[in-house]
Image (spheres, grey):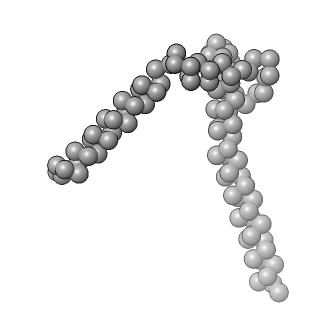
Amino acid sequence: MHGHNMSAVYRIAFTLFFIMLSLLYVFPMLCLLLGSLKPSSELMRIGLNSRLDPDVMSLDNYTYLFSGGSIYFKWFLTVLCSASLLRSSHCFFPL
């Protein structure tokens, strides 16, 4: 019976450990998501934080990204092409 209690303690300890580990992973992702909804002037003034401020938040950054005003997709295509070219050159011309 003593072994069963220790396995339950270990199971609870591991569960708590992995919950804390997952929170350490999710928190920065939440801050990045909230930061993407804030204008850049607000980010420069306050910095990246997890404060939820509906008065300041908007989808303007995503509208700018997908409306063609941004060069992100051109940059992404350039990086994708150069990485593909480099990878294929290693296949045909190994060192």
Residue 42, horizontal then vertical, whole percent: 68, 15
**Residue at 75% from the left image edge and 77% from the top image edge:** 7
Residue 82, horizontal then vertical, whole percent: 31, 35
Check the image and report above or below for 94 versus 85.
below
Q: Quadrant of residue 43?
A: top right
- Horizontal side of 7 relative to 44 (left or right) equals right
Q: Nearer the viewer, residue 29 or 64?
A: 64
Q: Quadrant of residue 77?
A: top left
**On-image quarter of the N terminus:** bottom right
**Residue at 77% from the left image edge and 66% from the top image edge:** 12
Q: Nearer the viewer, residue 25 or 54?
A: 54
Residue 32, horizontal then vertical, whole percent: 64, 32
Q: Nearer the viewer, residue 48 or 69?
A: 69
Check the image and report above or below for 92 versus 45.
below
Q: Nearer the viewer, residue 3 or 87?
A: 87
- Horizontal side of 88 relative to 60 (left or right) equals left
User: Hey, which residue is sitting farthest bottom in the picture?
Assistant: 1
**Residue at 23% from the left image edge and 51% from the top image edge:** 91
Check the image and report above or below for 15 versus 70.
below
Q: Quadrant of residue 31?
A: top right
**Number of numbered discs:** 0
Residue 47, horizontal then vertical, whole percent: 65, 21
